[in-house]
Image: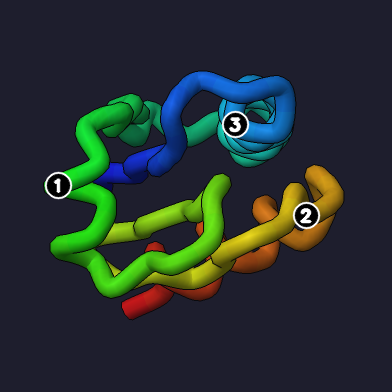
């Protein structure tokens, strides 16, 4: 599983990365987290408001920092067969 945190490196972007790492730790997942700070790449996902969370190339959250529990659910759902 590939998870991307989209954003220029603002406080909310860092918070989204933090809660994503916490959710992965709670799930015991070894997913890869990639930070995307290039505006051109961010726009390629159709994201108009950062931060955004992308799981396996699908934007699942945009414009806010969800709680760790929500990110955990999003990851678990994406990992389900």
- Dividing the picture into quadrants, the one containing residue 48 is bottom left
> Which of 51/58 is in front?
51
Q: Position of residue 60 (x, y in %)?
A: 49, 71
Left or right of residue 69: residue 18: left
Q: Earlier in the sequence, mark 3 or mark 1?
A: 3
The residue indicated by pointer 2 is: 66
The residue indicated by pointer 1 is: 40
Which circle, 3 or 1, is nearer the viewer?
1
Q: Secondary structure at mark 2?
A: loop
Q: Position of residue 34 (x, y in %)?
A: 29, 28
Q: Residue at x 71, y 33 (%)?
A: 12
Q: Secondary structure at mark 3?
A: helix
Q: Is residue 70 above or below residue 8?
A: below
Q: CA distance from mark 3 to mark 1?
A: 17 Å
Q: Quadrant of the C terminus?
A: bottom left
Which circle, 2 or 3, is nearer the viewer?
3
- Dividing the picture into quadrants, the one containing residue 10 is top right
Residue extending furthest bottom?
A: 81
Q: Earlier in the sequence, mark 2 or mark 3?
A: 3
Q: Is residue 6 above or below residue 36?
A: below
Q: CA distance from mark 2 to mark 1?
A: 24 Å
The residue indicated by pointer 3 is: 13
Q: Position of residue 53 (x, y in %)?
A: 48, 53
Q: CA distance from mark 2 to mark 3?
A: 11 Å
């Amino acid at each position: 599983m590939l998870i991307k945190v989209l954003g220029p490196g603002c406080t909310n972007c860092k918070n989204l990365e933090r809660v994503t790492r916490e959710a992965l730790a709670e799930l015991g997942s070894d997913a890869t987290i990639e930070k995307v700070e290039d505006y051109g790449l961010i726009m390629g996902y159709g994201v108009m408001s950062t931060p955004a969370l992308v799981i396996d190339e699908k934007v699942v959250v945009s414009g806010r920092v969800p709680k760790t529990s929500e990110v955990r659910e999003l990851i678990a759902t994406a990992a389900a067969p």
